[in-house]
Image: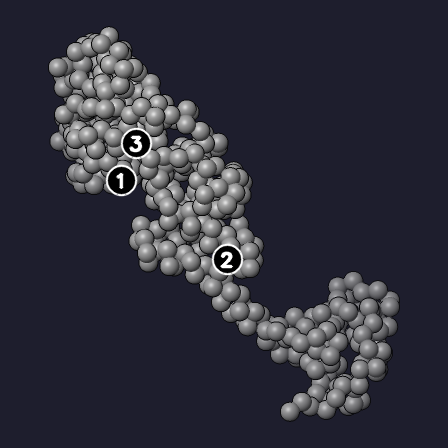
Amino acid sequence: MSGPPVDEARLRRLLGGPDLAWLVERVRRRLERAQPLTGAVSLATPSPAERAAAERVLGRAPRAGTALTVRLDAVDAVLVRSGISPDGLAAAVMALTGRVVPLEEVRRSEDQAWGVACAPLVLLAEELPQYAAWAVRVRDDGLVRRLARTPAAARPLVEQTVRVLRELPVAPARPLSVFAADILGSAHALDDGTPVATLALSGARALTGHPEGAGAAWRRAAWASAGLLRDDVSSTVLTLNLRGTPALDWMADVGDPCVLTLRQLAHRPPRTTPPVVHICENPAVLSAAADTYGPDARPLICLQGQPSAAALTLLARLHELGAALRYHGDFDWGGLRIATTLSGHVPWRPWRYTAHDYREAVAAAGPDLRPLGGKPAPSPWDPQLALALTEHALRVEEEAVLDVLLTDLEV
């Protein structure tokens, strides 16, 4: 049952004016925080009108001083004794400002609403465990909240993102705008700057292992790692002595490097493959093989860093045709990440890229090697390799072992 009624007309004359709004607001904040309405509250630089209003409530002048200090117990007593608010100060403030919802209750309600909004992420993680760590992270680090601002806006954002991530990686690669139109109903849904593009790209990177970065070129490469392309000609791959199309055959006859676009690979993929294809990280290796052996060099593909969509498309095609892939990269943490990313797309075996090979390279190079920097990374194909890098803390770039690599590339 509710208590005795508040005399609202008298209450508004006593406490409802602008000169005591500060006092009412202080009381309301205490109620929201479940704090007792006892003790004193102060206003640092009150106006004469605010001092006069407090004096009318208390029936006497407040304590002298620069600040205006009012004891809440005294105001409560006035309201009860006068019959204006028989249930005291709390009931009076709620009559003036509306029901007070405790902040703890507000937080619980908001947390529940955010949990409902993010529920599709939980289902995605159960369906596709490769997204599990990412789904927890974007909920806990506040990315979803920053992008959506409210639970109501978060739900459609999360649902759209989940629809995108369920389709990844895309193979063969597709234009990003066409994919967005098919999956989200708008060719511009995944344009830079949209919340769904930001959240979906974060999930795509978690899936492919694409490294952190910034800028338009980085975003293009990150999307491409999941098979989504801004266009089909900017993604390229560098090759030497591959055959299987008229253009490749012609370049292999003269032993010159060849740059293939994703468009070429989509429309005219190689029809044949050699039994073994070597893969390197840096163009210097491919260039040296072309200079040294020309048309007699073994088939070689250069990733030029993180594998592009064109590179992944080509390697997937060669693997389907039966090629055995052999990979070598820089002996540093970045090189290990590139190799790990590649292994998520096509199977390969190390080409002089083990802990034993690293130790031999360190011993042969002498004191000229640079210190190893950056964040450590695993080497799943040979766990001892990452341990060896940690032990020696020296980076060995492919150029430092070029002579050794070239011995494997002569037919």
Location of residue 211 with respect to 98 vertically, above or below? above
Which quadrant of the structure image shows residue 243? top left
Position in image of residue 146 (x %, y %): 53, 51
**As drawn, is 104 to the left or to the right of 56?**
left
Amino acid type at mark 2: Arg
* The N terminus: image quadrant: bottom right
Of mark 2 and mark 1, the one earlier in the sequence is 2
Contact between labelled residues 3 and 2, with CB atoms less than 8 Å apart: no
Q: Image height check: is 14 above or below 263?
A: below
Residue drawn where x is 80% and y is 74% of the image = 16
Residue to which mark 3 is pinned:
312
Colouring used for the render: one colour
Q: Dot 3: within a 10 Å radius of its alpha carbon, few (fewer than 14), some, or many (20 or more) residues?
A: many
Front position in the image: 16 or 67: 16
Per the image, the residue denoted by label 2 is: 155
The residue at 44%/56% (across/down) is 139
Crowd tier of the residue under label 2, counting other residues whose Cα lies within 10 Å: few below 14, some 14–19, many 20 or above: many
At label 3, which amino acid type do we have? Leu
